[in-house]
Image: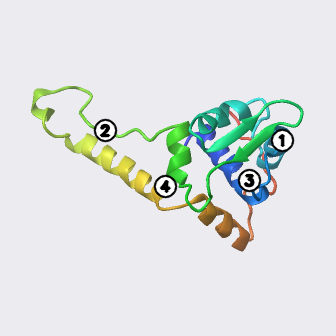
Amino acid sequence: MVSHTVEYALRAVIYLARRQGGEGSLPAQQIAEATGVPPNYLPKVLAPLVRAGILSAVRGVRGGYGLLRDPAELRVLDVVSCVDPIARVDRCPKCLPEHQHQLCPLHRLLDRAAEGTEQAFAAVSIRDLVEAESRSESDPLSSPRPLSGV
């Protein structure tokens, strides 16, 4: 499962990809309302994406956020990695001598699961999600409700 922050970031990026059409930025309030991201949390969610050059941010009355990357080239993994990277296991945390050169069975399993998640996210572009939503009867952005527990 991904964190609320990752889901919020993905919702916002998908919304920008659907709505922006290459014309500047969209107001933060509009993005928050459309995606169900708490308005006061949205800047914190999107800040890593701005630092990574995925989004632009303009402050002020006419400010907002814009998508800088082509949705066809932007992978879900790119967004996830900026906001809350998937933790891989490269060594056993107990530092046991017998596990010095290879992971124990438990940590090997956990790392394979993390690797599988990375591969699944790398295989899907933001455009893929936008297109899938346009073909779907259910739209996760059409009647958003903020997640609790942020």
Viewer-nearest of discs 1 and 3: 1
Q: Which residue is mark 1?
A: 27
Identify the mark nearer the N-term, 2 or 3. Answer: 3
Most foreground residue, 102 or 70: 70
Q: In which quadrant of the rendered image does the C terminus lie?
A: top right
- Report the disc number at residue 15: 3
Calculate the distance from the C-alpha at mark 2 to the C-alpha at mark 3: 33 Å
Residue that extends furthest to the right in the rendered view of this protein: 61
Viewer-nearest of discs 2 and 3: 3
- Report the disc number at residue 121: 4
> Residues at badges 1 and 4 in contact (C-beta under 8 Å)?
no
Identify the mark nearer the N-term, 1 or 3. Answer: 3
Kind of residue at badge 1: Pro
Q: Which residue is mark 2?
A: 89
**Residue 1 shows in this picture:** no
- Structural crowding at the residue carrying mark 4, measured as other residues with C-alpha within 10 Å and reported as few (<14), some (14–19) or many (≥20): some
Most foreground residue, 102 or 42: 42
